[in-house]
């Protein structure tokens, strides 16, 4: 589960976490450490000795958080008070994205805090939807700070610029301000109320059928696994569950996240989240589990539709591109065939022609079956068995645990992936086939683009300033992100947020007018 | 014992259930009309009932819920539970259908309605009690829903206003193949469907057992029960939360508070009063001081333990003596024989000391001496499981109480093994029961194991009904049942009718 941290302890009971939360930031002024509690203050967390201590424990705690973050811990640590002034950063060839100053500039100039705020706040003016929302920061020294919250987008931005987290995650809206949770008299007064319904699709879950790349690497060929998953899940969420506001986000390396933002989705409790995840889950069994798809017949309409989407991908992305059963790998296919005599006949045929490509081996099943090599299967069972195999190779493999819990945290859109430097940008589902994960801009590239833009427009700026006599110059009205290739992604996000807010207005009015009576 | 305390309350002193007066803005004190047999318990009671009714109704419902809980602890299936519960429900909480034209229809429903709300008050205080109450009430509702008259069930469901939409013929034809695929139907199965928000049927969604379209689940009629039951639970859980928040106001009523406190306490183990019929065992010759050693093999662990401690030390401390004396009195040992029994057991003690310090207490327990009330009441009543489970824990050197509760688990298992209970599964389950503080369930489990052959026999030949094999809630019931089972075929099988039927009536 690379992009998720499952809070096992109940939210109010984080005393077992060796590293609790930071004290609220009040405009960068250091707070006194709280006397005896296990709280680690912000300044403590950043000081090397404390950080060292924390690191040991944290590694044990989050050891399922795989190598995606391997670079963040090697980043040089800096103290906030040593931070240089936030002047434009010149990107030199030697500058890398793991440089804290690069990240600082990113938060300062590129991260779309305003739209992020509107997205989570569901309204232009600040509400508890934002103020009581949990953020969790992963700092450069790998310290993990939970239960951060912010009244406004500006304060979130300030803390990001000051702490320079390598990434931050978004949790649920709580019944009280997460920072106040310890001062509440009753533990039950602090409980999660709502959060987007989220999904996590990661290439690791495809490793047993992926032939083109291994580990953290991806290419366009295996990215089509993610494309297939997005298509199948997106249409089910829309047509079956009636959700409209679904944001797909590239996870920065080899996967994608979905944020279902409809009010109805945000209000689902754990049981109902489990229901949705279960509805979408199909593959059962681990690496050694044998056949992973055993769908009931007749196929549920959702599976029938998924199969219709996936059938073409199976022909191209799987049989041609992945070629999963070439040469000595044909055993995997044979394992999935329940009929012994068919298996034997195929084995014989393939042994004599080991270089036969997967597409022909797939066709061999039908031709041998037709020639009478079947002993136990009728044509209908054969067809169903082949459908199951298609689904096993193409059907979305969700990390369902992420979806089942209301209080699960997920990395925020527009964070920078610490391993690749790529920004976690939204994916346009209307053009999901065209999305190229390797073409997603990196943070260093984006900062370079700002400099280039500024250089090219310096002349104009001087003219403008002369004419307008120092009033807001036209250059100042251009946000830095607009100067870069991040622009289409921010525009996409802005459009998404606007549509959500428009619908949300309607929901709010309904809520206010509805005024349901209390029941005994 | 609850009943004794309150049966003395002047019956003219009527208690309005005025907690609702505080809870609800517009109380209307009038009789409600119960149109349906089933009840979602949305409206609180509005009429007055006597304190006595308040208490008895609650105790009766509690008995039903406790038996339901015992069923679930023994992993009985819904069908087995149904069979087991049917006589218990008939006795304590009968509910007839409209078609039965019973003359007590309204009274039954009123009792069901009121007792539910009384227990709701008693069990809303803690999260744990709320959860147990909700689970048991849900099971009770499910049992009743299942065996409800079909036509009346439809009427009841329609009255709930559950906002489900029956799908019309046109839509049904349009979606026919998808509905069939989603519901897993065979051909020709004529069924209706209705539409609800998918959130209402999470289990069906999770298992892909319904068709989903734009947030609506198309639910086959046969799944209706699970929705109605889920709705029942949801409403009850909400209501319990609300009641919990308003509970402090009820404390103001000093008449109800102690009853409610008692009720929630007795959820540990339902109380059972000692019945004189427990001493009336066909085929058992009158016990004597000399026969106790032989009879001890039929004693429950609490008494068996006292007996062996007494034999080992030739002594028992005060509370142990009292508990054991009352039990012996309960199995029919006469006062004289009882004095003889103790005299011989304390064999290291001089007559003088025994007569001065011990004899009086035994006579007092038998009602032979003491004030008018004690003598009229023939002394103390043998202790019930509930009494043993709620009294203070024994101190050093004391052996009284219920060993399932007072012993550490390891010592308890060792004790059980010494008495011959060596079945691994049983001991494992006892560990679990005890871990969950279900002491009386553990004891009943041991009883069932040590008498499994005999129980099977009386069940198979139908000589004993469900009521005779009720959960044991009194040490004297344990003894009686054990003795009878171990002496089957000696002319006494089937004559145990009194085992439980008058339990509630004989308090003194
Ligand atoms: Zn690849």
Image: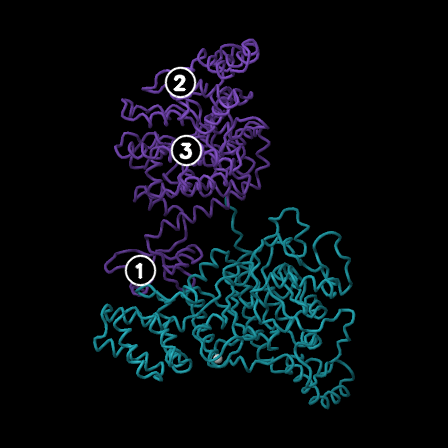
Chain colours: A cyan, B purple
Above or below, B296 against A174 in this view is above
Q: Say which of A56 and B330 sits in front.
A: A56
Give residue A341's quadrant in the image: bottom left
- Mark 3–mark 2 distance (CA, rounded to whole Å): 21 Å
Earlier in the chain: of badge 1 and badge 2, it is: 1
Crowd around label 3: few <14 · some 14–19 · many ≥20 (10 Å): few
Q: Chain of mark 3?
A: B
Whether marks 3 and 2 lie on the same chain: yes
| The furthest residue to the left | A372
Q: Give the residue number, with chain letter if any, for mark 1.
A: B184
Crowd around label 2: few <14 · some 14–19 · many ≥20 (10 Å): few
Viewer-nearest of discs 1 and 2: 2
Q: Are marks 3 and 2 in contact (CB under 8 Å)?
A: no
Q: Say which of A370 and A403 sits in front.
A: A370
Q: Chain of mark 2?
A: B
Q: Chain of mark 1?
A: B
Whether marks 3 and 1 lie on the same chain: yes
Q: How many marks?
A: 3
Earlier in the chain: of badge 3 and badge 2, it is: 2
Q: Give the residue number, with chain letter if any, for mark 2.
A: B291
Q: Which element is circle 2 on?
A: helix
Q: Which element is circle 3 on?
A: loop
Give residue B453's quadrant in the image: top left
Earlier in the chain: of badge 3 and badge 1, it is: 1
Q: Which element is circle 1 on?
A: loop
Position in image of residue A106 (x %, y %): 67, 76
Q: Give the residue number, with chain letter if any, for mark 3.
A: B420
């Amino acid at each position: 589960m690379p992009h998720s941290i499952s809070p096992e302890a109940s939210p109010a009971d984080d005393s077992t976490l060796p590293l609790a939360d930071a004290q609220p930031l009040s405009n960068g002024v250091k707070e006194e450490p709280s006397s005896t509690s296990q709280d680690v203050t912000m300044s403590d967390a950043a000081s090397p000795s404390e950080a060292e201590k924390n690191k040991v424990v944290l590694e044990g705690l989050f050891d399922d958080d795989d190598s995606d973050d391997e670079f963040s811990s090697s980043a040089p640590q800096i103290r906030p008070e040593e931070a240089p002034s936030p002047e434009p950063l010149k990107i030199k060839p030697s500058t890398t994205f793991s440089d804290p100053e690069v990240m600082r500039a990113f938060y300062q100039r590129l991260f779309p805090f305003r739209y992020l705020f509107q997205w989570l706040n569901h309204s232009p003016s600040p509400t508890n939807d934002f103020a009581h929302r949990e953020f969790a920061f992963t700092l450069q020294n790998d310290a993990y700070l939970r239960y951060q919250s912010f009244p406004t987008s500006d304060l979130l931005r300030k803390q990001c610029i000051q702490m320079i987290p390598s990434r931050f995650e978004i949790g649920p809206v709580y019944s009280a301000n997460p920072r106040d949770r310890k001062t509440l008299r009753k533990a039950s007064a602090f409980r999660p109320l709502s959060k987007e319904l989220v999904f996590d699709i990661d290439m690791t879950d495809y490793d047993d059928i992926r032939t083109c790349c291994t580990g953290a690497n991806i290419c366009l060929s295996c990215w089509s696994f993610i494309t297939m998953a997005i298509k199948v899940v997106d249409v089910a969420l829309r047509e079956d569950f009636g959700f409209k506001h679904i944001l797909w986000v590239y996870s920065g390396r080899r996967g994608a996240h979905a944020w279902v933002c409809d009010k109805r989705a945000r209000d689902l409790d754990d049981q109902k989240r489990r229901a949705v995840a279960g509805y979408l889950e199909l593959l059962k069994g681990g690496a050694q589990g044998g056949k992973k798809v055993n769908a009931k017949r007749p196929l549920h309409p959702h599976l029938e539709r998924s199969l219709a989407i996936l059938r073409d991908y199976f022909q191209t992305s799987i049989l041609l591109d992945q070629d999963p059963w070439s040469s000595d790998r044909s055993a995997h296919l044979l394992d999935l065939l329940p009929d012994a005599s068919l298996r034997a006949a195929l084995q014989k045929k393939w042994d004599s022609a080991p270089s036969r490509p997967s597409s022909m081996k797939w066709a061999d099943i039908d031709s041998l079956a037709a020639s009478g090599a079947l002993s136990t299967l009728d044509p209908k069972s054969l067809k169903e068995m082949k459908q199951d195999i298609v689904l096993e190779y193409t059907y979305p493999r969700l990390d369902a645990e992420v979806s089942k819990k209301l209080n699960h945290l997920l990395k925020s859109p527009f964070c920078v992936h610490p391993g690749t430097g790529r920004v976690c940008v939204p994916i346009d589902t209307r053009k999901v086939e065209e999305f190229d994960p390797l073409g997603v801009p990196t943070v260093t590239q984006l900062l370079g683009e700002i400099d280039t833009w500024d250089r090219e427009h310096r002349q104009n700026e001087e003219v403008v300033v002369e004419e307008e006599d120092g009033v807001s110059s036209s250059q100042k009205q251009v946000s830095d992100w607009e100067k870069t290739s991040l622009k289409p992604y921010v525009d996409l996000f802005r459009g998404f947020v606007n549509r959500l807010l428009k619908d949300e207005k309607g929901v709010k009015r309904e809520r206010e007018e509805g005024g349901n009576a209390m029941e005994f | 014992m609850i009943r004794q305390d309150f049966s003395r309350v002047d019956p003219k002193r009527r208690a309005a259930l005025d907690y609702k007066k505080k809870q609800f803005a517009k109380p209307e004190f009038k009789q409600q009309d119960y149109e349906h047999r089933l009840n979602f318990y949305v409206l609180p009671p509005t009429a007055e009932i006597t304190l006595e009714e308040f208490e008895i109704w609650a105790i009766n419902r509690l008995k039903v819920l406790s038996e339901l809980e015992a069923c679930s602890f023994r992993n009985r299936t819904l069908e087995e539970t149904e069979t087991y519960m049917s006589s218990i429900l008939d006795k304590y909480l009968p509910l007839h259908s409209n078609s039965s034209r019973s003359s007590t229809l309204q009274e039954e429903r009123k009792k069901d309605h009121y007792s539910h709300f009384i227990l709701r008050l008693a069990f809303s205080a803690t999260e744990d009690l709320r959860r147990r109450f909700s689970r048991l009430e849900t099971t009770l509702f499910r049992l009743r829903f299942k065996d409800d008259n079909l036509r009346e069930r439809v009427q009841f469901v329609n009255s709930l206003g559950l906002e489900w939409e029956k799908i019309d013929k046109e839509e049904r034809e349009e979606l026919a193949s998808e509905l069939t695929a989603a519901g897993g139907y065979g051909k020709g199965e004529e069924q209706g469907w209705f539409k609800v928000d998918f959130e209402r049927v999470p289990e069906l969604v999770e298992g892909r057992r319904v068709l989903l379209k734009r947030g609506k689940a198309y639910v086959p009629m046969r799944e209706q029960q699970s929705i109605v039951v889920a709705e029942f639970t949801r409403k009850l859980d909400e209501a319990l939360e609300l009641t919990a928040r308003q509970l402090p106001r009820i404390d103001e009523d000093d008449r109800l508070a102690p009853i409610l406190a008692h009720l929630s306490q007795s959820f540990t183990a339902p109380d059972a009063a000692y019945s004189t019929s427990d001493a009336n065992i066909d085929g058992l010759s009158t016990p004597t001081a000399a026969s106790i050693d032989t009879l001890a093999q039929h004693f429950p662990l609490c008494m068996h333990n006292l007996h062996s401690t007494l034999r080992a030390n030739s002594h028992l401390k005060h509370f142990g003596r009292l508990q054991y004396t009352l039990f012996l009195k309960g199995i029919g040992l006469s006062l004289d024989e009882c004095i003889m029994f103790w005299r011989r057991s304390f064999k290291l003690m001089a007559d003088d000391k025994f007569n001065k310090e011990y004899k009086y207490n035994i006579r007092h327990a038998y009602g032979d001496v003491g004030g008018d009330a004690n003598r009229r009441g023939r002394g103390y009543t043998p202790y019930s499981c509930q009494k043993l489970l709620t009294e203070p824990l024994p101190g050093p050197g004391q052996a009284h109480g219920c060993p399932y509760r007072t012993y550490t688990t390891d010592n308890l298992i060792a004790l059980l093994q010494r008495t011959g209970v060596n079945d691994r599964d049983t001991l494992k389950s006892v560990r679990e029961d005890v871990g969950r503080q279900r002491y009386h369930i553990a004891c009943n489990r041991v009883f069932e194991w040590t008498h499994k052959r005999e129980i099977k026999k009386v069940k198979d030949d139908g000589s004993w009904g469900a009521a005779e094999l009720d959960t044991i809630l009194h040490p004297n019931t344990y003894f009686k049942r054990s003795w009878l089972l171990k002496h089957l075929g000696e002319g006494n099988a089937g004559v145990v009718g009194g085992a439980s039927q008058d339990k509630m009536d004989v308090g003194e």
